[in-house]
Image: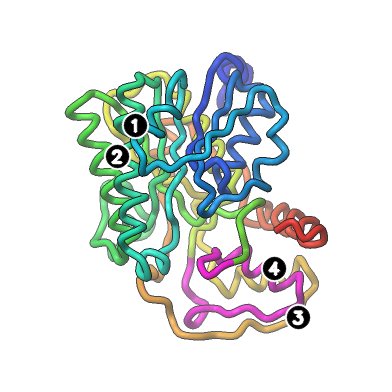
Amino acid sequence: MYDKQYHNNTISNASFLITGGAGFIGSNLVEYLLKYGAGKVRVLDNFSTGSMDNLRPFLDNPAFELIEGDIRNLDTCREAVAGMDYVSHQAALGSVPRSINDPVTSNDVNITGHLNMLVAARDAGVKRMVYAASSSTYGDHPGLPKVEDQIGKPLSPYAITKYVNELYGDIFSRTYKFHTIGLRYFNVFGPRQNPRGPYAAVIPLFIESALKNEAPFINGDGETSRDFTFVENAVQANIKAMLLPELDKHEVINIAFGERTTLNELWEGITAMTGVTLQAQHRDERAGDVRHSLANIGKASNLIGYTPEFSVQDGLKLAVSWYAANLQRSAI
């Protein structure tokens, strides 16, 4: 475990930019930083997928600042990074199906936007930029658990964009000595993850279905497995990566729990927590999906001291409780 007194003192004397801060992971990160007394937390978001509801609790906090803008605009990125010590770049268009349906926009946001943030952060002299990478980068590589330096061919436009992010991170490190850390997220879930819309993730969809006593759809036979990761673990990784004092090259690390759960097991667990007895309905596999995913988190542990504190079961209990409360208030 890291020294929380040291990290609290460091946070209280620092300023942080969170791109995509109105989104799922970003808003959880904003909440954490403000809770532990960050000197300034600035959010850059265009609200294309994020929600003002995620930021409403923070709007009256004097340490909070919001810039409504798009990472595809370099001048906006420069404005956002001005005076910031640390950057957590979470803004992106997620979802494999979204990228298959609209590869051009995914490319513009995830690649051009990422490059703009690298340029702006480099020129502003920020102490550290951390960015959201993705386990989709492993593509068709069959090995389990996934190890950072062994990847396959991408299986979707989204996966290509996230791999290009890593290539740019490496080039900026080699060429400009601007060293960043990419966090390869493995299926992050938790409070504020939107269950609505055509590209919603599986856990909020399952939880909402259970709470409404409706049978969800499972793509394929349900034996597809994922390394589901509670959002607080991802927040911890961002904080530790940003505050890492020394870095001499670009690094990419897996952020996961290190345990595999099938979709069938996931639905069984959620029904047990909610008292629902419905059977899920099965349909065809989705194009671009990886069959199995499991992370080796040894590098994250060694590099930044990452130790996931929430298991899948612990996280599901907290998520179910949050969605139950928010569905009743019709807030999501």
Q: How crowded is mark 3: few (under 14 residues within 10 Å), some or many (20 or more)?
A: few
| Figure disc tally | 4
Instruction: From the image, tell me which residue sits under label 4.
Output: 208
SS under mark 3: loop
Mark 1 or 2, which is nearer the eye? Answer: 2
Segment colored magenta:
197-225
Q: Which of marks 1 and 4 is nearer the N terminus?
A: 1
Instruction: From the image, tell me which residue sits under label 3.
Output: 277
Give me the C-alpha separation between circle 3 and circle 2. Answer: 48 Å
Residue 66 sits inside the magenta stretch: no
Mark 1 or 3, which is nearer the eye? Answer: 1
SS under mark 2: helix
Instruction: From the image, tell me which residue sits under label 2.
Output: 115
> x, y percentage for residue 186?
46, 54
Instruction: From the image, tell me which residue sits under label 1.
Output: 180
Determine whether, in the image, residue 99 is placed left or right of residue 196. Answer: left
In the rendered structure, find residue 212 and report the number of the disc placed on it: none
> x, y percentage for residue 138?
32, 57
